[in-house]
């Protein structure tokens, strides 16, 4: 499974590197700082859902302003996660493929049972 390309982040990693380089942010993009920023962004994403019912969450797409905010926070989480992996020289695709394979072993799909005769 590790040979599959489920996630391709090369272009995004390059764009994030160029963004950081243009601002001389390398000194701030340590794994620790990026992880803390990621946690902060996950908190901001969680805040959107904090006091909503499941029905209200399902209706977020119906409110353009709230949905736009949701999209921005999801993007922030993804950007920090990809940047963190890039700085750590971690291959996200390989990590995801490996984890999916381990999850398949740990949580096997139920085997359908034959109907009773």
Image (spheres, rainbow, N blue to C red):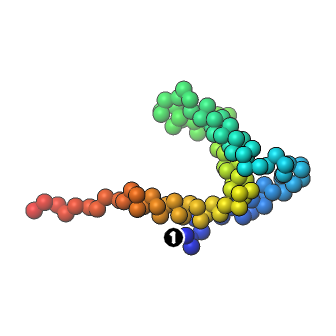
Q: Residue furthest top?
A: 51
Q: Quick one: quadrant of the C terminus?
A: bottom left
On screen, residue 71 above or below 6: above
Q: Residue furthest bottom?
A: 3
8 shown above or below 54: below
Check disc 1 and report its element: helix, strand or loop: loop
Count up the numbered dots: 1
Question: Disc 1 designates what residue?
Answer: 1
Q: Nearer the viewer, residue 59 or 10?
A: 10
Q: Is residue 49 above or below residue 99?
A: above
Residue 103 lies, in percent from the top left, at 45, 58
Reply above or below: 79 against 101.
above
On the image, which quarter does residue 72 sit in?
A: top right
* Residue under the point 63% across and 60% down: 92
Q: Is residue 51 visible?
A: yes
Foreground pick, 39 / 32:
32
Q: Residue 50 at x, y = what percent?
A: 56, 29
Where's residue 30, x and y in %? 77, 49
Q: Residue at x 52, y 31 (%)?
A: 56
From the viewer's perspective, tell me whether residue 43 is left or right of residue 112. right
Q: Is residue 18 left or right of residue 32?
A: right
Residue at 68% x, 56% y: name it: 85
The residue that appears at 66% across and 35% down in the rendered structure is 44
């Amino acid at each position: 499974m590790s040979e599959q390309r489920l996630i391709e982040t090369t272009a995004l990693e390059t764009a994030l590197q160029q963004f950081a380089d243009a601002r001389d942010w390398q000194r701030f993009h340590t794994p620790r700082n990026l992880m803390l920023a990621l946690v902060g962004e996950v908190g901001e994403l969680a805040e959107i859902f904090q006091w909503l019912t499941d029905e209200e969450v399902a209706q977020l797409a119906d409110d353009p302003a709230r949905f736009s905010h949701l999209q921005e926070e999801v993007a922030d989480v993804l950007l920090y996660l990809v940047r963190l992996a890039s700085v750590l020289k971690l291959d996200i695709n390989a990590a995801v493929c490996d984890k999916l394979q381990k999850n398949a072993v740990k949580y096997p799909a139920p085997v359908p049972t034959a109907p009773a005769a």
